[in-house]
Image: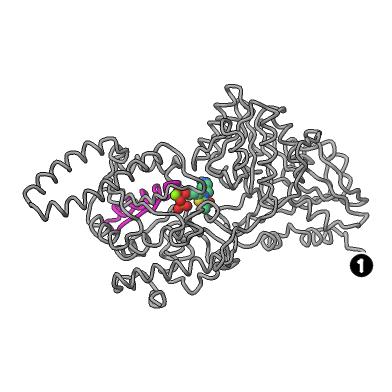
Amino acid sequence: MVLNRVNSPEDLKALSLEELLQLAEEIRSEIIRVTAQNGGHLASSLGAVELILALHRVFESPRDRLLFDVGHQAYAHKLVTGRKDRFHTLRQEGGLSGFTKVSESEHDAITVGHASTSLAHALGMTIARDLRGESYHVVAVIGDGALTGGMALAALNKIGELGKRMLIVLNDNEMSISENVGALNKYFKELQIRKWVQDAEKLGRQILEHISPKLFGLVDRAKEAAKLLLHQENPFYAWGLRYVGPVDGHDLKGLVHTLEHLKELDGPTLLHVVTQKGKGYKVAEADPIYWHGPPGFNPERPEKVAKGYSWSQAFGDAVTELAHLEPRLFVLTPAMREGSGLVRYSLEHPERYLDVGICEDVAVTTAAGMALRGLKPIVAIYSTFLQRAYDQAIHDVAIENLPVVFAIDRAGIVGADGATHHGVFDIAYLRTVPNFQIAAPKDALELRAMLRKALEVGGPVAIRYPRDNVERAPEGVWPEIEWGRWEVLKEGTEAYILAFGKTLRYALEAAGNDPRVGVVNARFLKPLDKEMLRSLARYKLLTVEDHQGMGGFGSAVLEALNEMGSRPEVRILALPDRFFEHGTIPSLHRQAGIDAEGIRKALREMGLHPAYER
Ligand SMILES: CC(=O)c1sc(CCOP(=O)(O)OP(=O)(O)O)c(C)[n+]1Cc1cnc(C)nc1N
Ligand SMILES: [Mg+2]
């Protein structure tokens, strides 16, 4: 096993080409083995194996800084930078992160999980390097999907202007999670046609050199002139970059040769490599969408695992039906068609569906444009990724009180993707924005009711729901809902648990059949149901939410009680002021004290000991 002899990137330098090729295969097997047991970003990491080995062969990490955009394709990087013995802990609680993470290794140049940040990071590093008179290399690997992000393109603009030495490697596999979108993506495809031209040219060159070196010189000069013409419209030239490629991203020998050459060049260079997402694992090559991030699987007989019916699917089914009832409805996604449950919708309503690419800011402001011209847009977006469009939500939607619905998926702790992906800030960052209304349904029926009503109430409405399974609601059923009204699910004589969203299940479990403890489905956070809150102010109150405590649902309840001059005993159960790493959702909820056990503990502390303890 070659991998056994690799404990740092330094060890790659001593390997022969055959050993490097052997190492690539061993790394592929290890990625498959561990992802099969832990789940993870399989296809992206399989596609980047040769590229990562070539980079570590040519550059000297950690002196040279290798940046991986999103960081989900970097499993090979982890394996050759001293973490192979811990690789089996990938994405497990207390184990290796599924992305690169500065605090995890000196070889991890940036902490990532959100896309399109690598180029601005690289820009900053080259400025720091030059200002401090240092001379290391800065290399940023960015996928074709991540390059659809506005901050990547804006950083390119600056990189090209400053002209500082750096290498940008565009890892082009024509895929985001779904098929990639955008004009640049189309252009890359054309360039790849040129790749076949290059291959033919290479063959022609060999023949010519064999026949007549003179003739070869003539043709070579003609080719250079043509190339200049052909490349004129190459946008990377307009961005002030040297463009090289496209080259085969799985040709380890060719990559090493090219990188050795590019390493010597000054200024910013973009190397366009063409890879196959899922390379080396038939099922992942055939279906890079499912195998982008599969849950565990049997590596010998890899089959798709049928997941339960999720909130995302409940949302997708609801909007697919709703579009038949409301012709002005339009659904937008920032590159998360599968994740947001929109495959069915996109097939049934292609003319009212838009994947803008990995650019949440564009999704929100495009929706604002649609709303200004009479459509009823719904932006389907993960809580964590909505953070990328906060100003757009305020500046382009809320100020004019536009009718844009935000279907916020993955609201709350999300599990193995960890701190970069937990959706635990959206209540705080939306609640303070005038005109925004915020709700959280208790089940799929209530989600349908809220979505339909949200299209009528006007103004920006955020409906948040968790990463979880949910009981399917019958098609065609659209229950009524009293907008802004909470729902008492269980009466109590001494205390009430006010639960927002997913934690309602924990509240009901904790209250059990204790007659002293009532439970409220506090499904509207803005507007808060102040009438019911006033009526409950004579009881002890316990709020519980899957969100940061600061600025969350509990804060809103306290502010409202203060406004009405009520001073009941109130306890807030929410996430403490720290980041939560990767782990299972139940375990992280337990750590945060917002699960049924945490609620029981809080009730005891409020003097409501369970009967068996009295
Ligand atoms: C992991 C994750 O959350 C990924 S990986 C990915 C596709 C990246 O495509 P790229 O071409 O860059 O890489 P490839 O997989 O190698 O093809 C997306 C959209 N996401 C979700 C996502 C959405 N929006 C933002 C801002 N960041 C992320 N990470
Ligand atoms: Mg890609």
Q: Which residue is drawn at the image coordinates 47% and 62% (left, top)?
A: 281
Q: Residue at x 46, y 61 (%)?
A: 102
Q: Residues within 10 Å of mark 1 (few under 14, many from 20)?
A: few
Please identify the quarter of the rendering in which residue 477 is found: top right
Q: How many marks?
A: 1
Q: How is the image coloured?
A: one colour
- Give whichever of 604, 500 is nearer the camera: 500
Foreground residue among 128 and 448: 448
Q: Is residue 315 above or below residue 136?
A: above
- Nearest the eye: 445 or 18: 18
Residue 350 locus on image (x, y percent): 57, 34
Instruction: Residue type at mark 1: give it.
Output: Tyr
Residue at figure coordinates x 64%, y 29% from the top left: 329
Query: Residue 144 appears at what percent x and percent y?
Result: 42, 47
Q: Give the residue number, with chain letter if any, for mark 1.
A: 612
> Image quadrant of residue 563?
top right
On screen, residue 519 versus residue 264, left or right, reads right
**Magenta segment, which residues?**
117-146
Image coords of residue 483 (percent x, y): 78, 33
Q: Between 344 and 457, which is closer to the camera in this rendering?
A: 344
Q: Residue placed at 50% from the left, 66% from the top?
A: 32
- The question of residue 294 being in magenta is answered with no
* Whether residue 417 is visible: yes
